[in-house]
Amino acid sequence: MKIFLSYASEQSELAKEIALALRAENHTVFFDRSALAAGEAYNAKIREAIEDSHLFVFLISPHSVTAGRYTLTELDFAERKWPRPWGYVLSAMVMPTPKVEIPSYVRAGTVLQPAGNVAATIAAEIHRIPKSGWLRIVQRYRAQLLVLIALAIVGAGAGWWYQQVQVERAALGRLFSEAQIQQDNGHYEDAWRHFEKARSLAPENPEVHENEAKLAMAWLENARITVGKGSFSAIVDKVLPALSRCAVSPDKLPAADCFAHMGWGDFLKSREGQGGVKPEQFYRRALALDPENTYAHAMSGFHILESHGSLDEAKQHFARALATGKERPYVQIAAFLYYTDEHLEDEAMRVVNDMRLNHESLPPDERDYSIRWSNLWNVYYSRMLNARDQQSFFSALSPADHLATFQWLFPEDWVPEGKRDLYRFFLGSFQELAGN
């Protein structure tokens, strides 16, 4: 549906959020006037945009109904196209406004009074509006037609409808199962194709949207790019619509998860010189919805360190993420991967030791080898072969923990032949330190 969004400049940030929610529902939204030059051409472009739209959304505020504001001119254009606003003009009270100041044309249409998220309320209301004019007429007189329609459905189509529902449900079940198998094997792109089929089969099914958002988050958490094949930006652009739909959900907890992953997606794109909004803005929005959100705290900690911020502040975020008891392996991996990359090896050892004590494990896929023999082995290599660095490294853990963690990470029968001499040196140093 083509939608014209009319708002006062004071509500521009809210208008952007509403436009994002509507575009996530595949609507075309006209709301950015900043690129238009003033004068007759400006009026013509606005009038043309309203003429071309299927729905006019008006944000009611004291600013938008003040005499002389351009919003009233836009409202006049809408009235010329739709003398009767019902079904074509949707208004939302975004700021308390005296009823007497609201134009009668606006009051004659549908006026929403959002109690919660404005963008989500408007998107939900538009979803209920039929797309064509004759259907809107039918909806207006639905009370008179309801009995006849119900009898027709019961008499002629109920059995067929039930059969179609069962067929659709079975097809979705197969697609969900196949997608889960692909996801469990780390084949996220193949899993995504199954959800594209599910969405085409049942585009409005909430179960499809919910599971698609979960897959989108898992894909971003585990995004891997082979040199010369694909890009982070391609992955992010593919999953962003699913995350946007989830982020405007009235359910705050999954919405917060999706906002956090939108920030993570922006970070991934920034690694390729792309990206728009700064990731921390998404993390703040996630924490506003859910102050203890695991993902937002873990990703905030990572972002603070990546931006060369305060180590203590980052550790507080990681600690709050761990305190939730959710996604603990993800949080630990995110923490020590950054520590090892940025030469904060003492912190890396504390995280790994904590994982050992809590009977956690490294990722069970090809990342295990990279983390174990690249990130962590290099920590020992860089700190144990220099006497000054060795002593400071020893102080990161107790002697017994150092020895136990090293043996947990590197069982002797796993050590490659080319690393055995260094392995014996490291092991002997920790045994001596522990008094063995």
Image (cartoon, rainbow, N blue to C red):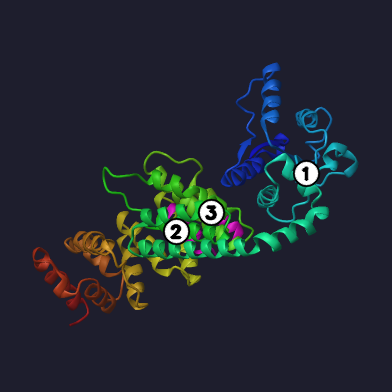
- Secondary structure under tag 2 reads helix
Spatial separation of the CA atoms under disc 2 and disc 3: 14 Å
User: The disc labelled 3 sits on which kind of residue?
Assistant: Phe
Give the farthest residue toward the front.
156
**Label 3 Cα neighbours within 10 Å, binned few <14 / some 14-19 / many ≥20:** many
Q: Is residue 428 visible to us here?
A: no
Which mark identifies residue 137? 1
Task: From this view, report whether residue 162 is shown above or below residue 398.
Answer: above
Q: Is residue 350 visible to us here?
A: yes
Measuring from the top left, give residue 299's x and y in whole percent: 45, 57
Identify the residue shown where x is 35% and y is 68%: 351
Which mark identifies residue 215? 2
Task: From this view, report whether residue 277 is shown above or below residue 408.
Answer: above
Look at the image and give the residue range highlighted in magenta: 285-303
Task: From this view, report whether residue 231 is shown above or below residue 364.
Answer: above
Q: Quadrant of residue 218?
A: bottom left
User: The disc labelled 2 sits on which kind of residue?
Assistant: Leu
Identify the residue shown where x is 66% and y is 23%: 45
Name the one closer to the observer, 288 or 102: 102
**Tag 1 and tag 3, C-beta contact below 8 Å:** no
User: The disc labelled 1 sits on which kind of residue?
Assistant: Ile
Q: Earlier in the sequence, mark 2 or mark 3?
A: 2
The N terminus is located in which quarter? top right
Spatial separation of the CA atoms under disc 2 and disc 1: 40 Å
The residue identified by callout 3 is 259
Q: Earlier in the sequence, mark 2 or mark 1?
A: 1
